[in-house]
Image (tube, grey):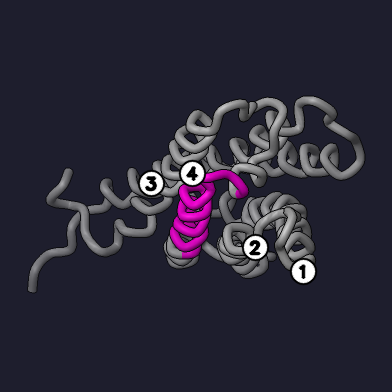
Amino acid sequence: MSKRLNIHSVPALVGIVGPIVVAVGDLAASSSVPGYSLVRDSVSSLALTSIGWLQSICFLAMGLLLVIFVAGLFFNIRRARVFHAGIVLLALCGFVLMLIATFHMDHPGAPPIDGTIHTIASYGLGLLFPIAILSLTPSLKNTPNWKNIFIYTLIAGVLALALISGALLAEQRGWFGLYERIIILNALVWVEVVAIHFLRLLLRQEPKPQS
């Protein structure tokens, strides 16, 4: 298998690595802060702790890796209606992740604009992701090698839309951290599943004959 990995496999590989980096980083950072609760406390509040740099690095890495991953999807999925909109929005999710990592939530001593940008970017990402992957579903359905993740993508997109609507319309008192992590986990699992599928397709491709 390793002999068949090449430069074309990079987008799939970074798509596999990115979600793992975020999940491990969140668990490592949260377990290092005394009194921090994965259920009660928001993901963003970790950035304000002594280990916050770790979370920021993980989010920056995920944003960059997501953009590379999306570039790979662009060249490997058959175009259908709203395909380009889905690709652009999914790539934009990567850039918004980097914004979230750079501008932290409101805290004493920080410029007010930081918290405003962070809040807008966080909820914006929650809306961008489901719209992006739902926009890709017609293309997945029409691409033979990608049809088997069409239903899963549809479910993940609808679930993401329902979850962010719940975050906007209802208060998750006492368990906001858990709710936020469910939103994030749904997105990370989608990227992981699609990246693994992408890599399997690349590894199944017959090598081109040497001239």
Label whose residue precedes the other's in the sequence (3 or 2): 3
To which residue does mark 1 refer? 113
Indicate which disc, 2 or 4, sits on the residue closer to the N terminus. Answer: 4
| Picture layout, residue 42 above or below residue 117 | above
> In the rendered view, would you say 13 is above or below 81?
above
User: Between disc 1 and disc 2, whose residue precedes?
Assistant: 2
C-alpha gap between disc 1 and disc 2:
9 Å
Q: Is residue 123 shown in magenta?
A: no
**From mark 1 to mark 3, how far is it between C-alphas?**
32 Å
| Residue position for label 2 | 103
- For label 1, the SS is helix
Q: Which residues are magenta?
A: 48-67
Q: Earlier in the sequence, mark 3 or mark 4?
A: 3
Q: Earlier in the sequence, mark 1 or mark 3?
A: 3
Task: Give how far apart the Cα atoms at labels 2 and 4 are.
Answer: 17 Å
Residue 69, x across and y down, in percent? 45, 59
Give coordinates of residue 3: x percent, y percent. 12, 51
Q: Which residue is pictured at 64% across the width and 52% down the height?
A: 133
Q: Earlier in the sequence, mark 1 or mark 4?
A: 4
Mark 4: secondary structure: helix
Amino acid found under the numbered disc labelled 4:
Val
Residue nearer the viewer, 174 or 186: 174
Q: Which mark is residue 17?
A: 3
In the picture shown, does residue 173 fall above or below 202?
Answer: above
Residue highlighted by disc 4: 22
Q: Residue 62: within the magenta?
A: yes
Amino acid type at circle 1 is Ile
Q: Mark 2 belongs to which amino acid?
A: Phe
Residue name at image x 71 percent, y 63 percent: 110
